Image (tube, rainbow, N blue to C red):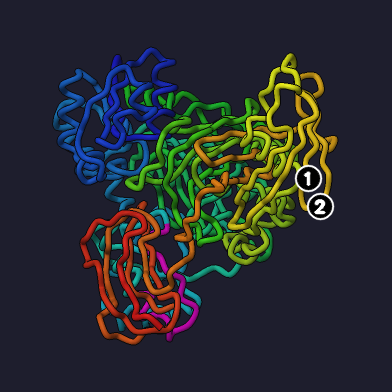
Amino acid sequence: MFNKILIANRGEIACRVMETAQKMGVSCVAVYSDADAAAKHVQMADEAVHIGGAAPADSYLKGDVIIRAALDTDAQAIHPGYGFLSENPDFVEAVEAAGLTFIGPSADAIRKMGLKDAAKVLMEQAGVPVVPGYHGENQDPEHLAGAADTIGYPVLIKAVAGGGGKGMRLVEKPAEFSAALDSARGEAKTAFGNDAVLVEKFVAKPRHIEVQVFGDGTHAVHLFERDCSLQRRHQKVIEEAPAPGMTPEMREAMGQAGVRAAEAIGYKGAGTVEFIVDASDGLRPDRFWFMEMNTRLQVEHPVTEAITGVDLVEWQLRVAAGESLPKQQGDLSINGHAFEARLYAEDVPKGFLPATGTLTHLKFPAECRADSGVRAGDTISPWYDPMIAKVVVHGPTRAVALESLHRALQQTEVAGTVTNLAFLGALTRHDGFASGDVDTGLIGRDLDGMVQAQEAHTEACVAAAMVALGLDTVEAHTGFTLWAPLHRAVQLMHEGEVVDLDVQVEGPDRQIWQFNGAEITAQRRNSRWVIDGEPMPQVAMSGARITVFDHYGLAFDLVDPLDRDASAIGDSNVVEAPMPGLVKAVFAIAGQAVKEGDRLAILEAMKMEHSLLAARDGVVAEVLAEAGAQVEAGAALVRLQED
């Protein structure tokens, strides 16, 4: 076994690898960018090396600098995590040329699976079923459109070198093909440096089911399946294992297909074979097709660990160190059910717009596994993926595990940035998901019912006001005669609405609040405040922001009565950057007439492209940014003429 390894990654996955490695007695070297100097993974490591600027291209994608860090610290191997250099065969070869061990598959295996079209041909040869489509080399737009006609609409355009939903477009009719192709190619070129695409049949009721495989370079086993059908923008939201409705016959067929795929390329380490499944007639062994193979550890690997009792990172280290597979297929079995929910800093009602901010409070219930790369006080940076944590639960049955997930999300406390926590909670209460009737279109169909803003109920408003005025911390021995004044008023802001409250303090253990014409009593019983008979929820305050941890978190802002700033009124004349990012393209020209909804610019931030649209009809007065510019949140990009 290795004495020391370097983790060529950051955030949650770097922390995850360190937890297992350090338990095994292996020292860990972290690498970090300017933005991550005080990050959690740096603090966890036995030693850390600075590798460059905040942008991934200046740090986490600099393979030569990372290899030099490993050599300088006497590390024997490099674990790539996922993302960044994890599926870069040139990096693998450079690691091995430096005399180090790459904890993962060979460069040859990565290359064989790296291009989707070539991988599908290889899988066909290995007897793995593949989805109908065009995977050829002819990239002429007319030829691709003809292929789509032959396959039959709807079709998916997918980047050959893609992943994570980037460079992927759904096309429902021929008239939309050309524009979708241009858009997919542009995004693929930016993300992967390769604008080649393939065209596949779009399955009407698709489920995304993947098989966890593990190989030693010759033989492979599968650790059963995961269902990743709950997606938005082709990115996973909640994953589970095993897949609901799975039959023994289909599990055997999919598992063996995954093993054949791994053994066909001499796979070594942890990998995932992803299948698209037609669930229109239940789960049948003849209705699943190979999509792609991820030649690395997956984000959702904890649900497999939960149902199998296997530590996949431990297996990675042991096999990379020269050991054989720790278990054979007959030694592996399924125990219970597990879910993983991805908690992100993102604004769901605004189209899952990635968010930034400093986490002023972060707490998870003890009953769940929370894999996180951030702590309270850390900042969600615009440079990297905005994941806060993966909330993982396990139970004896799917129903029990789902209730555990619902409870864990209810008890998760996050403040300092907008999150998708309420959306995740709503998903756990979706009738279709609860019954196991899932497909990749579920969120898109029912999104409106899951993104409704939570109204601030009476108890939450009173709790926020108590903390704002410091009335929640009075010690029992403090006499009410010391209070001055006995009547106090407070004004809060919630979701753009003003909330007015008034309180009469009758003593250290009793307060009478006036809110919306009603009288609410707050009393302290056994050192715990009770509001109108209900226990006071947990509350955190940072500056003027108060977060009540009820209904997945309700945010209030304390209004300064002397503040007369009216700048909050929106200006429909100016198109602003919603977050820090790179201006990818500008389509507006001074003097140009535009309609509401016209795309004026594209901002690239947090690994995604965001179209910036005109808020109204008008004429472009001024273009204030050009393609290639790095801008801050709120920067004016385009200004329209005054009405």
> What type is the residue that disc 1 sits on?
Gln
What residue would you read off at disc 1?
514
What residue would you read off at disc 2?
517
Residue drawn at x 63%, y 45% as measured from the top left: 554
Which residues are the magenta region? Answer: 165-181
Residue drawn at x 50%, y 55% as measured from the top left: 564
- Badge 1 local density, few (<14 within 10 Å), some, or many (20+)? some
Where residue 153 sits: x, y (%)?
49, 79
> In the picture shown, does residue 280 fall above or below 458?
below
Closer to the camera, 370 or 114?
Answer: 370
Distance, label 2 to label 1, CA atoms, is 6 Å
Closer to the camera, 521 or 626?
Answer: 521
Q: Are marks 2 and 1 in contact (CB under 8 Å)?
A: yes
Where residue 413 sits: x, y (%)?
59, 36
Regarding mark 1 in the picture, which secondary structure is present there? strand
Q: Quadrant of residue 189?
A: bottom left
- Badge 2 local density, few (<14 within 10 Å), some, or many (20+)? few
